[in-house]
Amino acid sequence: MDERGTSSARQHIERHGLNALHMIHKWSIEHDGLRRVVSINGYYRKGPGDRPSMDITTAILLIDMIARYRDRGVPRDQAVMEACPQRLRPILMTSMITIIVMVTVAFFPRTGMDAYQPLGTVILGGLIVGTILSLFDIPIMHTYIDDLIRWLNLRFLKRKWAWPVREHSQPTP
């Protein structure tokens, strides 16, 4: 408390505004009975911007294979069921390599890498959740968007829409 009767926290809020990252500056993690405290710094705020590129890669791999099957004339549901298992291995290999690297950055930082520990934690959590969700929601969203395109064509253009079939393209495993 100062001479005006205000606390230092209140002075900080008056000077810098009310920011969630100013209020919550430590994050507690408990792993194997060992409690760690991770500081939130500038790198922590950068993490959510870096992580979506892996989800985009997953989407591209899945949608590309589905589109190749559909170009050959395979029905949509069958194309989704055949493409997803074929692309599972490359998607998991890419994600697992990045997850293994981020585990060392997030939980066992070397000297000089301490500043990147919050970034590693954010990317690690996002990769695990994003990979699992992408494997489920990309095929589902493909079918929903395909149904929406069909409905819009029937409703507004008064025509039946079908995927354009190209006989010459072959899917590659």
Image (cartoon, rainbow, N blue to C red):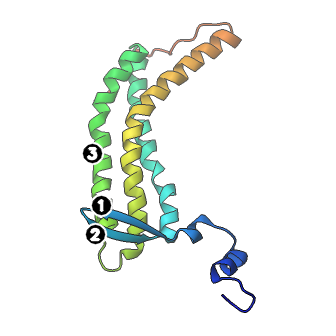
Q: Give left or right: position of 41 versus 80.
A: right
Query: Hey, what amino acid is under mark 3?
Result: Met
Taking depth in this image into account, of 144 and 86 the one nearest to the observer is: 144
Number of on-image labels: 3
The residue that appears at 57% across and 11% down in the rendered structure is 161
In percent of width and height, residue 31 lies at 28, 62
Can residue 158 be seen here? The reply is: yes
* Label 2: element kind: loop
Residue 43's tag is none
The residue at which mark 2 appears reads as 108
Q: Earlier in the sequence, mark 1 or mark 3?
A: 3
State the quadrant of the N terminus: bottom right
Q: Secondary structure at mark 1?
A: helix
Residue plotted at (44% across, 16% down): 166
The disc label shown at residue 103, or none: 1
Q: Are marks 2 and 1 in contact (CB under 8 Å)?
A: yes
Residue type beneath disc 2: Phe
